[in-house]
Image (cartoon, rainbow, N blue to C red):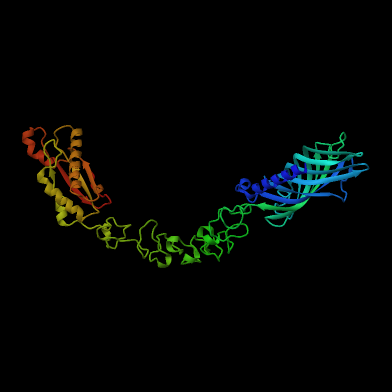
Amino acid sequence: MRTRLTKFSAIAFVLVFLLSANTALFAQNADRRTNLQIYGSALQYKGELGNQFFEKDMEWGGGISLNRYLSPSFDAGLHLTYGGADAVNGASSMDANIGTAMLGLRLKMYGKILKEDAFIGPYLTVAGGLAFASADGSVNGTAFDDNFTTSALMGGAGIRLRFSDVVSAFVQTGYLFTGNDGFDGQKGGDNDRFLQHNFGLGFNLGKATDTDGDGVPDRRDKCPDTPTGVQVDKNGCPIDTDGDGVPDYQDQCPTEAGVANLQGCPDRDGDGVADKDDQCPDEAGTAATQGCPDSDGDGVADRDDKCPDTPAGVQTGPDGCPTDADGDGVPDNEDLCPNSAGPADKGGCPELDAATLKLMEEKVRFEFDRARVQEGYKQLLDSIVVALEKYPDHVLLIKGHADHIGSAEYNQALSERRAQAVKDYLIERGVQNPDRLVTRGYGETQPLVKVNERLSKRRTESARAKNRRVGFELNTPDMKLNMD
């Protein structure tokens, strides 16, 4: 039996070594969750030959355990021990070598009740498995020699003493129940049992998981996603020298307490412009004016604004005054013709020259019941295109007319088509901003020549031809047109 126990112990130690060497098998991605314990173990016997509990004399052996962290409250473990027990009572005696292999569960007081890294860590433990025994001796002078395997159950308590993240010591006492009464060669009473005392060292295996590589294990890292290379404190969080809540690696002013939305820089006047960029750090301003006040909101700081009361929304120049694109002295926001110079009393619009006024008196004539621009009038319309280029801000009213032949409704539609035909031609010839071409149809209501409608069509043809026309009116863009 001693040979069998020796072989068993050798196999068990090899198994534990292999398991502990490959910590990834147990540790997964957690922080040193596998613990290897090596310890001395002593047994105190209680059975038919007596009760050695709490006596000084003990038989010593040893053991090894491989423990796995399950949660802050529980560990699981594989426990292998080897030891001996002997006793003498009169003519009876026994000498037993005992090995145990058990799986256990540990209830820790140092996960939630106490801190996990507390120096003193009490715990309770329970384990179950097998006991392997080789026992010999005598019963009332009759020798016995027996080898057997039996069930075993142990409950106990211990204290862990933590020296570092890797090394700890422990002491533990457990009550070992067995499923056999043959350790002392005498059967028939209560099964033999033992007190088992263990003390030794524990070693946390593997390497602490440190996802962000800052030197602080994930278990204690309050900032586990810190970028590579950033200096951190003991909690794994980036250093914040000025204590403003913005870590130094993101802080543009790491030695001055500031605000997060300004990359950690101070803003004395609270205008949203960091003092380092603020041309007026003690007066609230705007970002557009480098932190300086801008009373009229035109984008020019008051200190540089020659027109500090410019109405809101008015475009201004570098001096803060309204722009005057045509240089006529009338600011664009008041200039009816901002692209062509004119006097103030005309709203900044130029007066039409004599040639243009004469051109506006010309008419485009149309064939009877037609809305087609005839070739002979295209030169006139081309001249109007030139006039519109000369007065780019003016509006042209295109007025269509018809003679009296036909219904009033038909003639109204015909006059509108004639005005539109002229507009289409002007657009085709490249008039800029076609929106300033306004058409209006007047039907037969405004004849140039009064026609005696009782006469025949032949006799009134010449007069009616003068009434089939399109006329023009060019005026300022405030639409002060004669629409009647």
Residue 119 position by quadrant: bottom right
In the rendered structure, the answer to whether residue 310 lies left or right of residue 41 reads: left
Residue positioned 16% across, 43% down in the render: 470
In the rendered structure, the answer to whether residue 375 lies left or right of residue 147 reads: left
Q: Is residue 52 above or below residue 286?
A: above
Residue positioned 6% across, 34% down in the render: 458
Q: On the rendered image, what quadrant is the C terminus found in? A: top left
Q: Is residue 160 visible?
A: no
In the image, 347 versus 287, the foreground residue is 287
Q: Is residue 364 above or below residue 324?
A: above
Q: On the rendered image, what quadrant is the N terminus found in? A: top right
In percent of width and height, residue 220 lies at: 63, 54
In the image, 47 versus 120, the foreground residue is 47
In percent of width and height, residue 189 lies at: 88, 35
In percent of width and height, residue 256 lies at: 55, 65
In the image, 205 versus 268, the foreground residue is 205
Residue 8 position by quadrant: top right
The residue sitting at the left extreme is: 459
Q: Is residue 90 above or below residue 170?
A: above
In the rendered structure, the answer to whether residue 412 lies left or right of residue 49 reads: left
In percent of width and height, residue 173 lies at: 80, 47
In the image, 85 versus 350, the foreground residue is 85
